[in-house]
Amino acid sequence: MQGFLDRTFLILGHEGIEVLSAPLIAISGLGGVGGGTFLNLVRSGVKRFRLAENGVFDTPDMNRQAAAFASTLGRPKIEVYEELARGINPEIELELFPEGLLTGNLERFLDGSDVNIGVIDFEKGADVKAMTPDLLKRFNVPLFSAMVFGFGAILVAHHPEGMMPDEFWGLARKRSAGEGFPSFMSGRFGPTIAGRIENSFAAGKSPSTSIGGAFAGAILASEVMAYLLRGTDLVTRETIFAPRFMVVDPMRPTVEVVDVTAHES
C-alpha cells in the first residue's frame, strides 16, 4: 500500500482500498469542479482514470481551480493534472484525451468505464451531451455531475436505467418561474446570491467562488465514492440519482436532498 494512503486506510480498511483501486473513472472536464474532484479521488486511492480536457489555464481560473497558479498559466490543464496525480501516486493509471471530448471519441471514452464524471461547462459540448445518454445506457455507466453555485454547490447524478439529463432539467425548468437557471434550484441559495448569479448568466458570465468550487469537488468525489463503495459496510444508503439531487449552501447553512418530481408544500 502506498504511504500516502496510511491515514485513509484507517477509515477504508483493506476492503475499501481494494474496492477503489479497480474501477475506471472517466472524467470529462478538468476545470473548477473536475480538477478538484480528480485530485480528491486520487488522494482517496482511486487509481484508474480516463481524462478528457483540451483547455489551458488562464488568469480567471485562479479564483477556484485547484491547479491554477501563476506558474501554470498557459499550460494545458490535462498536462498539469497528470503531473500532480503522478506526484501523489506514481502507480496511477491514466489514459489521456488531450483533444477533449468529441463526438468522434465519446464512445471510446465511455466504453469500459465504470463511472462517468461529466463536468463540461453548460454552454459547451452540446453535440457530445446529446450523444451521451444513449451511450451511458449501452455501456451501463452512471453519470455524476456537480456545479458551483455561489459559495455552495448542486450535485446531480444519473443512473443508466433512470432519469437522464434532458428529462431532469426539463422538469426543473417546468417547476420554475421565468427564464435562465431554474429558480426551483437557485431559490434554495437565498435571494441575493441567486439574483446575482441569474444576472451574471444573463450577461454571459459564469460566476463562482473558491469555496463553491471546493464544495462541488468534495460532494462530487464523495458521491462517486459512495457509489463505488456500495455493498461494503462503509456505505449504508442509496446513491443519490435523479430525480433526486443534492444542494449544499454553507451560507445558510443547509444540506438538502430534493426530488424534482415531488410536490412541495
Image (cartoon, rainbow, N blue to C red):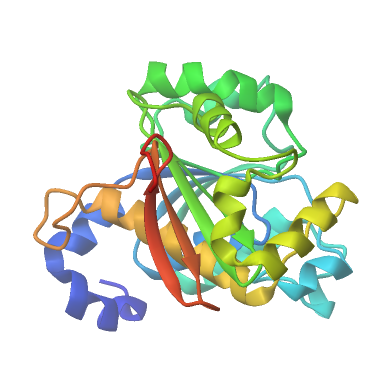
Left or right, 133 with reference to 200: left
Note whether residue 242 is visible: yes
**Depicted 127 relative to depicted 187: above or below:** above
Q: Which of 7 and 238 is in front in this view?
A: 238
Q: Is 168 situated above or below 234?
A: above
- In the rendered image, the residue lying farthest to the front is 265
Which one is in front, 116 or 201? 201
Q: Residue furthest bottom?
A: 7
Residue 134, horizontal then vertical, whole percent:
49, 16
Q: Position of residue 265 (x, y in %)?
A: 38, 48
Figure disc tally = 0
Residue that appears at 51% across and 77% down: 252
Q: Quadrant of residue 115?
A: top left
Q: Report which quarter residue 9 is drawn in.
A: bottom left
Residue 158 percent location from the top left of the image: 41, 35
Across and down, in percent, residue 16 comes to 19, 62
* Picture residue at 40% right of the left edge, 19% below the top: 137
Residue at left offset 76%, top offset 45%: 54
The one nearer the camera, 61 or 26, is 61
Work out which quarter of the rendered image holds the N terminus and state it. bottom left
Residue 82 seen by the camera = no
- Going by the picture, which residue comes out furthest to the left? 233
Q: Is residue 171 above or below residue 52?
A: above
Q: Residue at x 19, y 69 (%)?
A: 12
Q: In front: 248, or 36?
A: 248
